[in-house]
Amino acid sequence: MVLLAVGVTCAVVAAAAGGYLYGHRTSATATHAAGATGAARSAPAAARPYQLTAPKSVLSGAYVVDPEMTPPASETDVRDYAALGIANPVPVSVAYKSASTASKQTAQLTGAWGTISDPEKAVDRHFAKSARDNAATPNGGAALVGSPQTMHPSGLGDAVMKCQNLRVKLGSGHTVTSPVCAWADHSTFGVVMVFDPASLRNGGTGVSLGENADTAARIRNDARVPR
């Protein structure tokens, strides 16, 4: 298990988040995002459909699959993705850890591929559902902060991406804040969270929204393959 904060594992943070990431029901670069925020936009129709995969490594080998932290998808996930507006969703869930033993950084990707008629609406529904779920469990220890911000990281292509900070109160009394980014195009939807234990120690804020957006865009490019 990868240490996320003092005496805390990634699994503990995911559990405190109240199943924020689909597929984690029992537990959550090149350049920074240009401009960070901007007017909301809908993704144009993609030239060809893609499917979402779970590569054994991403970011040019910087992250490798962590099988201990990768739970299987469930029928509940299929229903949740369908509720976002994804037709015939095929869930994907994978956890990554740094390939370097000197780094304890981790990343999580959950998502689905199918047919998405309105990518921006799918992203908005995701954040709205997450906010409702967190509000329904006020003692769950997790809460979204502020509002989702539209991001335009390099390499995003035809997708819509929005990011928002997630604040998690740990059992130790510490509070950590880590960004969550969700993207959608006309055939894939994904949510990425990056955890940096070094910056989260002592109540830190982890990576920035822009850094997480950049990483999410790169993971998207690694995980999408033509059908």
Image (cartoon, rainbow, N blue to C red):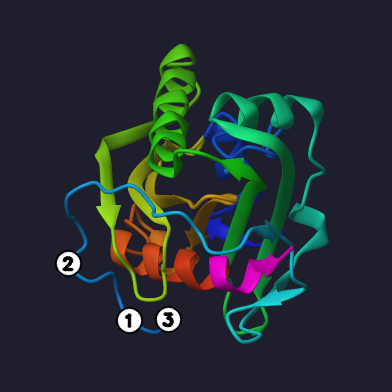
Q: Residue at x 37, y 40 (%)?
A: 167
Q: Nearer the viewer, residue 29 or 122?
A: 122
Boundaries of the magenta span: 220-227
Residue 152 image position (x, y, % from top left): 29, 64
Q: Measure the alpha-carbon separation of dots 1 and 2.
A: 11 Å
Q: Mark 1 points at which residue?
A: 31
Q: Which kind of residue does numbered mark 1 sit on? A: Thr
**In the image: residue 82, left or right of residue 5:** right
Visible residue check, residue 196: no
Q: Which kind of residue does numbered mark 2 sit on? A: Gly
Q: Nearer the viewer, residue 191 or 42?
A: 42
**Where's the C terminus, which quadrant?**
bottom right
Q: Eyeballing the image, is 76 above or below 121?
A: above
Residue 211 image position (x, y, % from top left): 35, 69
Q: Which of 15 and 153 is in front in this view?
A: 153
**In the image: residue 12, left or right of residue 44:** right
Q: How crowded is mark 2: few (under 14 residues within 10 Å), some or many (20 or more)?
A: few
Identify the mark at residue 15; answer none if there is no mark.
none
**In the image: residue 207, left or right of residue 89:** left
Identify the mark at residue 35; answer none if there is no mark.
2
Q: Residues within 10 Å of mark 3 (few under 14, many from 20)?
A: few
